[in-house]
Amino acid sequence: MLLKTLSESSGVSGGEQEIRNIIRQQVSPHVEEAETDVLGNLIVRKKGEKEGPTLMIVTHMDEVGMIVVGFEKSGLIKFSKVGGIDDRVLVSKVVQIGPQKIPGVIGAKAIHLQKPEERKKSIKIDDMYIDIGAGSREEAEKKVKLGDYISFITRFEEIGDHCAKGKALDNRVGCAVLIEILKKQNYPYSFYGVFTVQEEVGMRGAGAAAYRIKPDLALVVEGTTAADVVEVKKEGHVTTLGKGPALTIMDASVITHRGMVQFLKKLAEQNGIPYQIRRFTGAGTDAGRIALTREGVPSAVVSVPCRYIHNPAGILNLKDMENTVKLVDVFLKNLPEGGFNNEGID
Ligand code: CO
């Protein structure tokens, strides 16, 4: 399964080479052009039957992870986080470091060495290290370099009722959706597919890509929080697994284009595709950056709900992913020739 390959490969923000190469290999035979810009965004152009509005479909390929910042004399490795990860999920996780994928374990003082008061507190990242089994700093430095990226090792598996578990589902699921779309037959209009870098450290790739493409409209495909778990009240669920692609009205980065959202809702209803509205206004996506590029870009976000994002393992429903592909597919087939204007805004 393509999502397995994408989920198990590495691509911490700023170090997207491995994931980009896999995506490029997947899409190259199906697109007219494929180019990597100076930041590392992979920009492809899919030829349509004719030229219409300039559309970019955007999905970020980076994931949260860590980076090597130093070595202890003993050979243990000090690290920092890249992107938003809760310190409390790090201890004892198995990781891989650098291009050689050197395996290691995130360690901390074992429970029998902790004082009673220490046991009550969560361990901070400053008190953690990565152990690659090296006997000295010199040994460690032979295998790992300062600035090497670190990602979790998590086996992707299909589990339960149409579900899958794996790491980096935010946003390898978005990559899987866009790859599937790019593999389809030609659509009425040409469009750009953009796999962005550095979203998890502040949507840094998307702005540069949008500036270059000058889109008339943008559709962002994401893996978003599903908080449909026991300790969260229903209104805080954000999205729910199995209820279809989620449409964003507003988050911390963007207020989406009402016309586009209405259009997506109507298409979902007409085509029997389940959908949900994303509740909760926190967090941001590449749409926040793209919408404010140049003179403004009508933008919308379609997300696949994922539980436990930014953790070593998350869970999604594969039917939600399939329905997201369907929704993007009908969007492309029915795109208005004139794009979206400010109708309904003034
Ligand atoms: Co994301």
Image: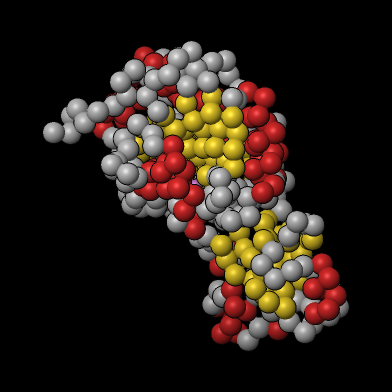
Question: In the displayed structure, would residue 314 be above or below residue 1?
Answer: below
**Residue occupying the point 44% across, 37% down:** 213
Residue 242 seen in render: no
> Toward the viewer: 263 or 50?
50
> Toward the viewer: 100 or 151?
100
**Residue occupying the point 58% across, 82% down:** 118
Rendered location of residue 238, percent (x, y):
39, 44
Q: Quadrant of residue 23?
A: top right
Apparent side of residue 153 relative to residue 325 in the rendered image (left or right): right
> Toward the viewer: 41 or 58?
41
Apparent side of residue 279 relative to residue 208 in the rendered image (left or right): left
Q: Quadrant of residue 74?
A: bottom right
Rendered location of residue 43, percent (x, y):
54, 37
**Residue occupying the point 65% across, 73% down:** 69
Rendered location of residue 151, percent (x, y):
67, 57
The count of marks equals 0
Rendered location of residue 327, percent (x, y):
45, 23
Quarter of the rendering occupied by the C terminus: top left
Question: In the displayed structure, would residue 323 be above or below residue 314?
Answer: above
The residue furthest left is 346
Residue 63 seen in render: yes
Q: Quadrant of residue 124?
A: bottom right
Query: Colour scheme used in the picture?
Result: secondary structure
**Residue occupying the point 83% across, 78% down:** 138
Quarter of the rendering occupied by the N terminus: top right
